[in-house]
């Protein structure tokens, strides 16, 4: 959608309303946390912040890429969840796994910013 704002050039809004996929990631619902990793994330402030940041980056990245790349990101997200769950209650392991995934998603977004879809 193109929008003209007074005194500004033409701005093209990129739709974040990409079609929802059945495997979209939703952040951990701490009221329903059942796995050791989920409970540890919910009870550790820094890990909860990592979860929120990662979920936000995932939503942005999957909303900006084409379907083929979206599938790759979703596959990587499933692998991330398996790795995260394997950490169990090990907060250092969870922190490392989140840091890696956040770097990966940031790289996707940085790549889009470098070449655009604009």
Image (cartoon, grey):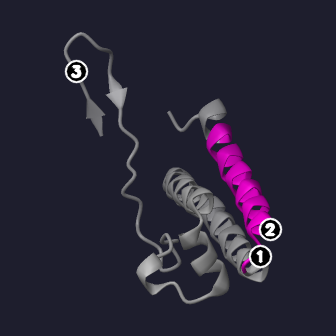
| Label 3 packing within 10 angstroms: few (<14), some (14-19), many (20+) | few
**Which SS class for mark 3?**
loop
Location of mark 3 (residue): 5
Residue 13 or 32: which is nearer the viewer?
Answer: 32
Horizontal placement of 95 versus 35: left or right? right
User: Who's the residue at 64% across and 33% down the image?
Assistant: 115
Horizontal placement of 73 versus 43: left or right? right
Query: Would you identify the image quadrant in which residue 110 lies?
Result: top right
User: Who's the residue at 58% across and 80% down the image?
Assistant: 39
Magenta region: which residues?
89-111
Q: Residue 106: horizontal and vertical position, in percent?
A: 66, 46
Q: Residue 84: horizontal and vertical position, in percent?
A: 72, 74
Q: Is residue 77 magenta?
A: no
Residue 97 or 5: which is nearer the viewer?
Answer: 97
Q: Is residue 96 magenta?
A: yes
Question: In the displayed image of the protein, which residue is found farthest to the bottom?
Answer: 34
Query: Would you identify the image quadrant in which residue 41 lies?
Result: bottom right
Horizontal placement of 2 versus 90: left or right? left
Q: Are marks 1 and 2 in contact (CB under 8 Å)?
A: no
Above or below residue 65? Residue 2 is above
Location of mark 2 (residue): 93
Location of mark 1 (residue): 83
């Amino acid at each position: 959608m193109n929008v003209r704002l007074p005194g500004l050039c033409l701005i093209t809004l990129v739709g974040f309303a990409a079609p929802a996929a059945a495997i979209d990631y939703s952040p951990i619902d701490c009221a329903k946390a059942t796995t050791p990793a989920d409970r540890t994330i919910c009870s550790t402030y820094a890990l909860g912040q990592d979860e929120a940041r990662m979920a936000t980056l995932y939503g942005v990245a999957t909303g900006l890429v084409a379907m083929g790349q979206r599938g790759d990101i979703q596959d990587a997200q499933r692998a991330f969840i398996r790795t995260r769950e394997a950490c169990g209650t090990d907060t250092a392991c969870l922190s490392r796994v989140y840091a890696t995934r956040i770097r990966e998603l940031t790289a996707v977004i940085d790549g889009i910013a470098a070449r655009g879809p604009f």
